Structure formats: structure tokens, C-alpha cells
Amino acid sequence: MPRKLLHLKEAADRLRRSEAQLRWMVHNGTAPPSALIAGRRMFDEDLLDRWIEEHFKSQPTD
């Protein structure tokens, strides 16, 4: 099954962040896993979803 890759803008939209904020997260090492492919920052949709889930699991519940 082929991977679905998201451009930086698509990933930023999913995270409700601006492209600049997501670039800053990449720079700081706090962003979801990504790769430079042909000079463009790309995010694997499945890895992005897992990254989001892991962050929800790591939050304390009230």
C-alpha cells in the first residue's frame, strides 16, 4: 500500500498551525516525523496521525 504524503501546508492545517510554526517545530526537533523529498518537506499521513495520538496519550487526564 503506497504511503500518503502530505505537504507542509497540509500537515500544518491538520495540526492547526501556520506553515511558519510547523517549520519552527521542525527546526527545534519538536515536529512530527518528516523528510525532505526532492527539496520539499513531506509528512507521512500515518506517522502524523500516530504522532498526534501519542501526544494525547501522554497528557494527564483530569
Image (spheres, rainbow, N blue to C red):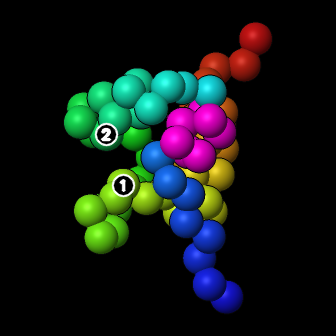
Q: Residue furthest right?
A: 62
The alpha-carbon separation of the residues under discs 2 and 1 comes to 9 Å
The residue that label 1 is drawn on is 41
Q: Position of residue 60 (x, y in %)?
A: 64, 20
Q: Amino acid at mark 1?
A: Arg
Query: Was residue 54 drawn as part of the magenta stretch in this picture?
Result: no
Secondary structure mostly seen in the magenta stretch: helix
For residue 9, above or below residue 22: below
Q: Residues within 10 Å of mark 2 (few under 14, many from 20)?
A: some
Count of marks placed on residues: 2
Q: Is residue 25 visible?
A: no
Q: Amino acid at mark 2?
A: Val
The residue that label 2 is drawn on is 26
Q: Residue furthest bottom?
A: 1
Which quarter of the image is occupied by the C terminus? top right
Q: Residue at x 30, y 70 (%)?
A: 38
Q: Residue at x 46, y 46 (%)?
A: 8
Q: Residue at x 62, y 27 (%)?
A: 16
For residue 11, above or below residue 50: above
For residue 8, above or below residue 20: below
Q: Earlier in the sequence, mark 2 or mark 1?
A: 2
Q: Secondary structure at mark 2?
A: helix
For residue 3, above or below residue 17: below
**Toward the viewer: 43 or 32?**
43
Q: Which residues are magenta?
A: 9-15
Query: Was residue 12 drawn as part of the magenta stretch in this picture?
Result: yes
Is the residue under label 1 in contact with that under label 2 (CB below 8 Å)?
yes
